[in-house]
Amino acid sequence: RIHAHAVQPGVKARDEIKNIIAVASGKGGVGKSTVTANLALALQADGARVGVLDADIYGPSQPRMLGVRGQPESKDGKHMQPMLGHGIQVMSAGFLVDEETPMIWRGPMVTQALEQLLTETAWEALDYLIVDMPPGTGDIQLTLAQKVPVSGGVIVTTPQDIALLDARKGLRMFEKVDVAVLGIVENMSTHICSNCGHEEHIFGSGGGAAMASQYGVHLLGSLPLDITIREQSDSGYPTVAADPEGRIATDYRHMARSV
Ligand code: ADP
């Protein structure tokens, strides 16, 4: 596990947050937000106090995934109170604009908005703040990883070659800003047919493991492509909350113990 001293000084929020973990992906749609929400719930199930900062400013999905609605309030006129979803403290750009409003912001505005979301939220004593990063590994992500005192990074990928190529850029991005990579999560690794039980590797197989061994990082876990995962996230009850004793929740709790 990473420890409090891993958090660099310079951010006001540091007294209230012990560890900041950034969850990144090379490309969109690989399950970064789903993994963020479930990892947060799994850490909480282990007794940690957890928050989620939805930094996926162009497509904030944590409000819906963690089943939180409404607008954050302020007690002191300076800080916003985080919203609560399944006991997780949540802050998202999604709370500040309506769902239909597209975000057309330039890089510096995005970075500034995210710094504000981080430092102007009245986080209450967190062991972990999990940051759902914007997809990709460009300038925005790099600046973010630099400005936010991240203690460790997690990379989500599918086993597909194209996603792996992009995920490698994610590894390099964390390296560039001296953030330790805690591991890789391979999502959508296999699909088990709900009719006949046949197992299929829709996006290829073993890519995450190969990448982990090639770069000397941990493979935190592999998760199946499963319709119930999608249904549960859509309904505001991510799998770890919806089926805490199930196989996928168990896998997530296992992962949470190795970050
Ligand atoms: P990203 O954050 O990388 O863009 P999301 O977490 O939003 O990706 O996932 C994209 C879509 O795929 C969502 O509808 C989500 O519910 C679904 N999804 C993610 N992981 C899985 C999985 N393992 N099985 C089935 N559906 C999944």
Image: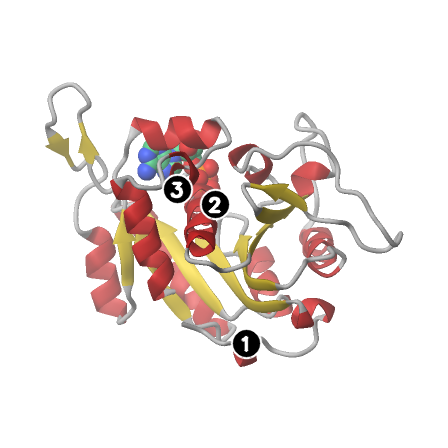
Viewed as shown, does residue 221 lie left or right of 20?
Answer: left
Mark 2 residue CB less than 8 A from any atom of ligand 1: yes
Q: Which mark is residue 210?
A: none
Instruction: Kindly indicate whether the residue at mark 1 contacts the one at mark 2 (C-beta within 8 angstroms).
Output: no
Mark 3–mark 2 CB contact (< 8 Å): yes
For image coordinates 28% across by 39% down, the residue present is 246
Task: For label 1, count other residues whose C-alpha is less than 10 Å away and answer few (under 14), some (14-19) or many (20+).
Answer: some
The residues bearing labels 3 and 2 have C-alpha atoms spaced at a distance of: 9 Å
Q: Tell me the quarter of the picture where residue 68 sits.
A: top right
Describe the element under mark 1 as helix, strand or loop: helix
Q: Which quarter of the image is occupied by the C terminus?
A: bottom left
Q: Is mark 3 within 8 Å of ligand 1?
A: no
Within 10 angstroms of label 3, few (less than 14), some, or many (20 or more) residues?
many
Which of pointers 3 and 2 indicates the residue nearer the eye?
Answer: 3
The spot of residue 177 in percent (x, y) is 52, 73
State the CA–CA distance, disc 1 to disc 3: 26 Å
Judge by depth and name the residue closer to the eye, 238 or 61. 238
Query: Would you name the residue on which mark 1 appears?
Result: 4
Query: Amino acid type of disc 3?
Result: Val
Who's the residue at 49% across and 60% down the image?
48
Q: Which mark identifies residue 37?
A: 2
Give amino acid for label 1. Answer: Ala
For label 3, the SS is helix
- Mark earlier in primary sequence (1, 3): 1
Q: Which residue is mark 3?
A: 240
Measured as percent of width and height from the top left, residue 32 is found at 44, 46
Image quarter hosting the N terminus: bottom left
Q: Is residue 235 left or right of residue 118?
A: left
Q: Amino acid at mark 2?
A: Ala
Q: Circle 2 — which element?
A: helix
- Ligand 1 visible in quadrant: top left
